[in-house]
Image (tube, rainbow, N blue to C red):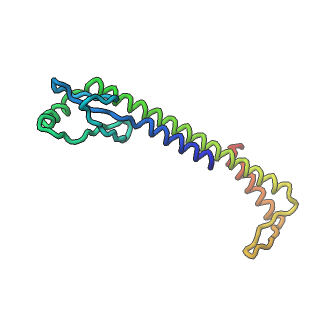
């Protein structure tokens, strides 16, 4: 439980770091520029994560000159700043995904180790016990016959082998 909470904290920090602000500005020649540092007159562009790459959505244009430039910007290739921003976002997504995969693998390995330990303890206890019992609905012990006890031990051994991955 504690490991899961730590993994969730680490993943939330990674997601917060991956979500960087991007600023959009238009220079005197009408060129649109994207940057991670704000400049005078720059607008904050909202970053939305979807799939493997980041998609960038800007606020709606506020003037007629901005709306005239919008269709041209869609058809033109991305600026170097846009390409770098997208590349950085994709790299950050990959790092975040890899960290999450490592955390999941560690959690799975820990659960498997715990299951193996419990199955081994259950089997060892059944072998060492002279008599095996079940607890009835009324809370009283119901002792198994020798055949039932042998079958229970066999079942516990198979469960141990399955949990521990041994043959």
The C terminus sits in image quarter: top right
Q: Which residue is the extreme one toward the right?
A: 130
Taking the spot 50% from the left edge, 35% from the top edge, the residue there is 98
Q: Position of residue 135 (x, y in %)?
A: 76, 69
Comparing 43 with 18, the one in front is 43
Q: Position of residue 120 (x, y in %)?
A: 76, 49
Q: How many numbered dots are placed on residues in this image?
A: 0
Report which quarter residue 81 is drawn in.
Answer: top left
Q: Which residue is the extreme one toward the bottom?
A: 138
Q: Is residue 9 above or below residue 151?
A: above
Q: Is residue 120 left or right of residue 62?
A: right
Report which quarter residue 67 is drawn in.
Answer: top left
Q: Is residue 160 above or below residue 132?
A: above
Comparing 126 with 25, the one in front is 25
Comparing 106 with 160, the one in front is 106
Q: Position of residue 154 (x, y in %)?
A: 76, 55
Q: Is residue 11 above or below residue 129?
A: above
Taking the spot 31% from the left edge, 27% from the top edge, the residue there is 83
Taking the spot 73% from the left edge, 57% from the top edge, the residue there is 155
Q: Position of residue 16 (x, y in %)?
A: 44, 39
């Amino acid at each position: 439980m504690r490991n899961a909470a730590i993994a969730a904290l680490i993943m939330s920090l990674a997601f917060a770091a991956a979500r960087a602000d991007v600023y959009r500005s238009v220079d005197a020649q009408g060129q649109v520029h994207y940057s991670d540092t704000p400049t005078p007159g720059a607008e904050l562009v909202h970053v939305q994560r979807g799939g493997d790459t980041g998609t960038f959505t800007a606020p709606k244009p506020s003037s007629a000159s901005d709306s005239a430039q919008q269709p041209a910007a869609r058809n033109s290739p991305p600026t170097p700043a846009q390409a770098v921003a997208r590349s950085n976002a994709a790299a950050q997504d990959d790092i975040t995904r890899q960290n999450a995969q490592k955390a999941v693998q560690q959690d799975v390995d820990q659960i498997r180790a715990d299951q193996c330990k419990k199955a081994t303890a259950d089997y060892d206890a059944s072998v060492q016990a002279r008599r095996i019992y079940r607890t009835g609905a009324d809370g009283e012990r119901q002792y198994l016959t020798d055949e039932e006890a042998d079958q229970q031990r066999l079942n516990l051994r198979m469960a141990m082998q399955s949990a521990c991955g041994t043959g």
